[in-house]
Amino acid sequence: MPEEAEGTAGSPTHEVRDFLRRRREQIAQRWADEALFRAVFTVSRDEAVEAGKAVVDGLAQVADAQRVEDPDAAGFTSVREQLARMGAARSRAGLSTAQVSSELAALRPPVENLLLADLPDASPEEARACVTTLSVLMGTLRVVVMQTALSEGQALIDRQRLQLLEVATPVIKLWDGIVAVPLIGTLDSARSQVVMETLLESIVEQQARYAILDITGVPTVDSLVAQHLMKTVAAARLMGAECIVSGIRPAIAQTMVHLGLDLGTVVTRASLADALGYVLHQLGVGIVNPVVNGPVTR
Amino acid sequence: MSQAFPGPYGGPVTGHVPVLRLGEVLLVTLQGDLHDSTAQQLQQDLAETISRSGATGVIIDISGVEIVDSFLGRVLAEIAGQTELLAARTVVVGMRPAVAITLVELGLSLPGVHTALSTEVAMELLTQHAPSSRYGGLRQESP
């Protein structure tokens, strides 16, 4: 209706807004029977109805602001958390994005039917305009839910990535004054940095004179990773600790020689056990085998 | 036991880092930010003090230093070099992880500088390996 001034009571958005406010209770009741609400709010039906009412209020607010096509409209802010919870609950239940989206689409027909029932004496054009506006509004709601669910997923991934970085670099105290980092998985620049920092911090914390970097679990070493290893060893030396690299695989040793990398200044040992043996020897600690009562040679 | 080693003009002078003497070891504790001129002054003071006192070891504690720039890094390396020429060994003690990372990133790995985690370890290091007196010649140390 281009000739109709926006903001008057007769415009389709305000028609829809008034309808939403008038039929708030009925819409929420019908939504509570839909698969999406039933699956998310399993405790009681009243809870689902309450959630439905909150969403209807939000939609009415968006219609009031004449921003039915805007996913950033203020009306969605109040219900965003609730929508995120719904979206997240459905993704956790193993539903694909398309399935969640179609469940959201199922919310539209009941509202549309109510709206049509509310407009018995309206002209076909007016009725169509109102239904179109409502469809747009429900479409925007769908976008908002999907958006929120995706950003929740992204936040989860970010949290997990951080946790993985921390979990992947445990610094273990092997003996008084000996710490070790068993590295597992691919080393990239960021991870090497974390390894370096945590190792140096624990050298200070434990007053460790020896640090063992075990790379048995590292599948490949490129020149960048090797450079990081060298830096870690140099930094540990500056702090007054000796760094031993252990567990270099034959293939990696070959690659390093091919790359022309010189680990000449770094003490290396074949395995973590050998490295520990070397360090214990340096510290003057011996281990006695209790069975044969003789020193364990390594 | 320990005494503040007097500056060249008698008492301690401002702008000088105090050099303590513990037996045959000189102990220098750096605190906070060091001016370039103070660092150079320290380098000079140490050289004179070593030759005068006959110390066999120098411990430089930098645990109170937040920032080591390339200049201070070079001064430390030079101190190590000159004390080596004066028949003493320099041990840098208590470098913070952040400082160590920065120095390595700058490409300054201070070759020839001995390091230790604490002054205690450094004392051990100096008394173990150094000859008991620099006039006494080399003595065979049993491990």
Image (spheres, rainbow, N blue to C red):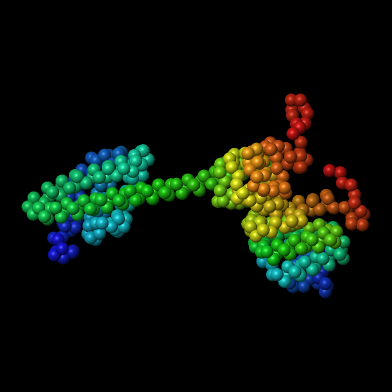
Q: Which residue appears farthest toward the top when viewing the image?
A: A291
Q: Position of residue A149 (x, y in %)?
A: 36, 48
Q: Position of residue B6 (x, y in %)?
A: 82, 69
Seen from the viewer's position, the closer of residues B108 and B16 is B108
Q: Is residue B6 left or right of residue A16?
A: right
Q: Is residue A189 left or right of residue B50?
A: left
- The residue drawn where x is 30% and y is 59% is A74
Residue A3 drawn above or below residue A114: below
Q: Which residue appears farthest toward the bottom when viewing the image?
A: B9
Tag count = 0
Q: Position of residue B43 (x, y in %)?
A: 77, 66
Residue B108 seen in the current view: yes
Q: Position of residue B12 (x, y in %)?
A: 78, 71
The part of the image, by quadrant, that contains residue B32 is: bottom right
Residue B20 seen in the current view: no
- The residue drawn where x is 23% and y is 60% is A66
The N terminus of chain A - image quarter? bottom left
Seen from the viewer's position, the closer of residues A234 and B88 is A234
Q: Is residue B26 left or right of residue A246?
A: right
The part of the image, by quadrant, that contains residue A256 is: top right
- The residue drawn where x is 37% and y is 40% is A92
The C terminus of chain A - image quarter? top right
Seen from the viewer's position, the closer of residues A3 and B20 is A3
- The residue drawn where x is 16% and y is 57% is A12
Residue B75 drawn above or below residue A123: below
